[in-house]
Image (tube, grey):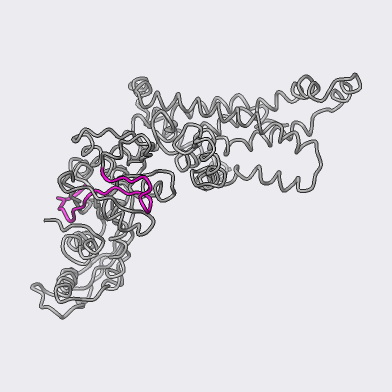
Amino acid sequence: MVLAAGAVVIIVLPLIGLLARVSWSTLWSELSAHDAYVALRLSLETSLGALAIALVVGLPLAWVLARRRFPGRSVLRGLVTLPMVLPPVVGGIALLYAFGRRGVAGQLIYHLTGWRFVFNTSGAMLAEAFVSMPFLIVTAEAAFRSMDRRGEEAAATLGAGPAYRFRRVTLPAVAPALAAGAALTWARALGEFGATITFAGNLPGATQTTPLLIYLDIESGHEATALALSLVLLVVSLAVLVGLRDRWLGSP
Amino acid sequence: MARLTSNRRTALATALAAFSVIVVACGSSGSRQGMASNVTSTTAPSATSAGATVTGGLDVFAAASLTGAFSSAKTGLMRANPELDLTYNFAGSNALVTQIQQGAPADVFASADQTNMNKLVTAGLVETPVTFARNKLEIAVAPGNPKHISSLADLAHPGVSVVLEAEGVPAGDYTRSVLSSHHITVSPMSLETDVKAALAKVTSGEADATVVYVTDVRAAGRSVAGVSIPDSLQPDIGYPIAVVKATRNHRAAQAFVDSAVSGEVQEALEAAGFLPPH
């Protein structure tokens, strides 16, 4: 019991400490100050963009991993979950070597189109997608794998094509699990810091997402702003957890 | 250490004599011990009674631009004071100020500008600071200067991607004040947390240019090229150093500060390209 209480202390005490130091009276003025407002808006934009990327490319991959057998499938599955355990700053460095101006793919993209990810909002989105996509893939794959296939089979015997079946039968069946996965993915993208600051840079309005501004504010002694922004992210995280509590924390 | 000219030997002897004046009574554990005197240098007579070398733990919080010089000074300091446990914490000066304000265990603080040091002076957290080095700004570009940057004004060119240091970081603030007083508008692509991070953006090829100190360009060797900024545009860059009042090893802290003003550490600073304090 004592050890269990220790775990509670480690997790809960920092949250209490944060809440205790927030300056409630100046909260709104801190959040509506220009830099804070811009960072919050940018974070919303980049995290939703990252979620969109995750859905567009992650869902098909999850489906392939769940439904198709091919050599190397388990290796592929391991690789796509790697960003979940990789230290984010390592992810940022890896992204630099892949998509930076001198990177493997980045070089080609830059020469062909002049497009660059580093110092660009697209870079922040890419960094967030990199770290959060695995959550969607894992949740979606599990859902595709465990769903009742009889609906799909019935639709097939009735003459429905693969795309129709996917849209009208498969997706609705996995929708609850997908929603949970999407919520987690979005929350993870919103909170990303290490990969963003290493890969995308730090510029208000372009790449300075909320976690980056919090870090810089704490570093430069603007404690009140940092606390106000931290409170926003804390509330958002709690909302996601509360929304997911049955699915993630309850029995499967 | 490099060859010891007679000037350097005198300076070294002075530094060691300064250290040997100090009889250290407590190490980092806080226990008092009587130390036998142990003169570590006999090349020059010391004006004060000989004492033991400096011992105990010493945490020096220093601006990122001091990384090379302070690190190279460590070897000599540790050799002269084998029981000294010297550790450095290098970061942007503003980040270090915040850490010290929050109670981080620093014994000495070396800042890259007065503004940051003044925050600690006003808060009563440091003893009287003293200027120990001066520096100059320099533009850092990729080797070979592919974008043909020759002056600060070139940084305003739309085809040049520039990174600067963030608000509150001395190098960034110095650069911005020079740019604004000469009506040069630069739109940086990113605001980095210290000079080393800004330099890394140039060495990795992501940015075409940044503005750091001449000492940083020198320390980066062949991975960057430097474009000098004329003296007429240079701001007055003075590095202050001070003993942190909450230090638990005041003697070692004071000895380090003294060495930075004129001693082993000052020599390492000048070897790295810093200008002397006067």
Residue A62 located within the stretch drawn in magenta: no
User: Residue B65 location in percent, x, y?
Assistant: 29, 52
Instruction: Name the quarter where the C terminus of chain B is drawn.
Output: bottom left
Instruction: Name the quarter where the N terminus of chain B is drawn.
Output: bottom left
Q: Is residue A187 left or right of residue B74?
A: right
Tell me the residue at 74%/46% (across/down): A74
Q: Is residue B90 above or below residue A220?
A: below
User: Residue A164 location in percent, x, y?
Assistant: 79, 21
Tell me the residue at 58%/38% (across/down): A130
Q: Is residue B54 left or right of residue A176?
A: left
In the image, B160 versus A201, the foreground residue is B160
Residue B134 located within the stretch drawn in magenta: yes
Is residue A6 at least partly visible in the picture?
no
Q: Residue furthest bottom?
A: B42
Magenta range is B125-151
Q: Is residue A67 above or below residue B251?
A: above
Tell me the residue at 33%/60% (across/down): B87
In the image, A50 versus B86, the foreground residue is A50
Is residue A51 at least partly visible in the picture?
yes
Tell me the residue at 30%/37% (across/down): B167
Q: Is residue B77 above or below residue A172?
A: below
User: Residue B26 location in percent, x, y?
Assistant: 26, 65
Q: Residue furthest right?
A: A157
User: Residue B128 location in percent, x, y?
Assistant: 14, 50
Which image quadrant for residue A144? top right
